[in-house]
Image (cartoon, helix red, strand yellow):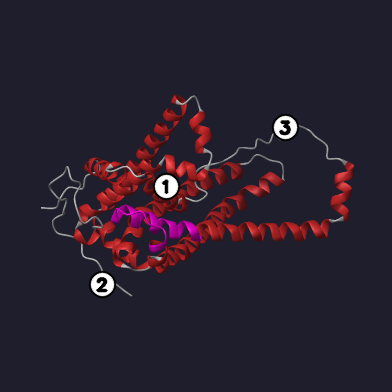
């Protein structure tokens, strides 16, 4: 009989492991070290942010001096803009590379119960670089697909817009574009969720590259696609709870907590229990499918019975 995969049971298991990892005993140096790895694993994805509101309804004229300067130095402005864009892209690549390496550093600390930076940085260099390349390729392809999805309906809508008419083509273009773009974003979101929660652990456990880990995950997904789709919805609920928790704590500190959370590294240190719990949850969920998907070699002290699924799903042999 096939074992039931639970969404709720891993919560208690992850909670016990988080308490053991962070509070038994509490070590400030350990906390800040693991917090650094957690910050690196989410570099630029949380912490300080800002909003700029542009009011396009305001009719403001550009100064003739500015217009004259732009016309006189247009070639120079174009060159600087291009170099600026290339610099932003280059920084984006560097950040993504650091995030990929940081994900393995943080996962290694959580799994081993240690607080290390240098050792996992070196040990998972190959896996981190593979994750970086795979992510860049996938995100680039996703962007191209989104552009195609936008171009197809716009090809029907633009002629009507240029003619100044509000024809059926405009509405049909929007009716096609919006659901298609939402579908692409949902699929891309699921891929990124599985990449972080399942593929990175499989890469870490088996010492394989991202493409091999996806092939190992494939039979697991095909065996229970409904469970993994529901997993994504359940994770969305968990993220909402995380957000509400942080919001509540911030309000309880008279909004002083929000100011603290604007500092990226401090943000990672303060919210470390959430990050550790979240990482443990995905590992506890994954290990229900059999020992070949298990990165956790022992049970939390307060829990006796291990979770081992019957009839484990076979995976492909490891590749160097």
Q: Nearer the viewer, mark 2 or mark 1?
A: 1
- Rendered residue at 35%/38% (across/down): 237
Task: Identify the mark nearer the N-term, 2 or 1.
Answer: 1
The answer to whether 203 is drawn above or below residue 157 in the figure is: below
* Predominant secondary structure, magenta span: helix
Q: Nearest the camera: 94 or 222? A: 94
The answer to whether 55 is drawn above or below residue 288 in the figure is: above
Check disc 1: other Cα within 10 Å, few if <14, some if 14-19, many if 20+: some
Can you tell which mark lies on residue 32?
A: 1
Q: Quadrant of the C terminus?
A: bottom left
The answer to whether 127 is drawn above or below residue 184 in the figure is: below
**Residue 155 is covered by the magenta coloring:** no
* Residue 101 rendering spot, x and y as whole percentages: 44, 60
**Farthest bottom residue?**
320
**Residue 115 is covered by the magenta coloring:** yes
User: Quick check: marks 2 and 3 in contact, CB under 8 Å?
Assistant: no
Can you tell which mark lies on residue 57?
A: 3
Task: Identify the mark nearer the N-term, 2 or 3.
Answer: 3
Cα–Cα gap, marks 2 and 1: 38 Å
Check disc 3: other Cα within 10 Å, few if <14, some if 14-19, many if 20+: few
Cα–Cα gap, marks 2 and 3: 61 Å
Task: Identify the mark nearer the N-term, 3 or 1.
Answer: 1
- Rendered residue at 43%/57% (across/down): 102
Task: Tell me where the magenta segment starts and ends, as one range.
Answer: 97-119
Residue at the spot of label 2: 317
Is residue 139 found left or right of 228 in the rendered image?
right
Disc 3 secondary structure class: loop
- Rendered residue at 46%/26% (across/down): 253
Disc 1 secondary structure class: helix
């Amino acid at each position: 009989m096939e074992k039931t995969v639970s969404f709720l049971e891993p919560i208690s298991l992850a909670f016990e492991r988080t308490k053991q990892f962070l509070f038994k005993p509490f070590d400030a140096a350990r906390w800040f070290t693991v917090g650094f790895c957690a910050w690196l694993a989410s570099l630029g994805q949380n912490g300080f942010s800002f909003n700029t509101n542009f009011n396009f309804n305001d009719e403001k004229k550009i100064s003739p001096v500015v217009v004259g300067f732009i016309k006189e130095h247009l070639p120079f402005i174009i060159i600087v803009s291009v170099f600026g864009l290339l610099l932003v892209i280059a920084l984006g690549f560097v950040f993504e590379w650091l995030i990929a390496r940081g994900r393995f550093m943080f996962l290694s600390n959580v799994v081993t119960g240690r607080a290390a930076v240098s050792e996992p940085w070196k040990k998972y260099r190959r896996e981190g670089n593979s994750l970086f390349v795979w992510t860049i390729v996938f995100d680039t392809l996703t962007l191209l697909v989104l552009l195609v999805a936008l171009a197809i309906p716009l090809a029907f809508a633009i002629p009507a817009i240029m003619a100044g008419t509000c024809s059926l083509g405009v509405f049909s273009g929007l009716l096609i574009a919006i659901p298609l773009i939402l579908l692409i974003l949902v699929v891309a979101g699921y891929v990124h969720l599985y990449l972080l929660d399942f593929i990175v652990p499989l890469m870490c456990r088996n010492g394989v590259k991202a493409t091999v880990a996806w092939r190992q995950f494939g039979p697991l997904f095909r065996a229970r696609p409904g469970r993994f789709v529901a997993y994504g919805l359940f994770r969305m609920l968990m993220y909402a709870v995380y957000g509400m928790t942080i919001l509540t704590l911030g309000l309880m500190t008279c909004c002083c907590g929000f100011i603290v959370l604007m500092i990226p590294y401090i943000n990672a240190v303060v919210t470390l229990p959430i990050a550790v719990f979240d990482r443990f949850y995905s590992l506890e969920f994954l290990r229900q499918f059999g020992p070949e998907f298990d990165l956790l070699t022992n049970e939390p002290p307060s829990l006796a019975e291990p979770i081992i699924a019957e009839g484990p799903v076979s995976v492909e042999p490891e590749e160097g």
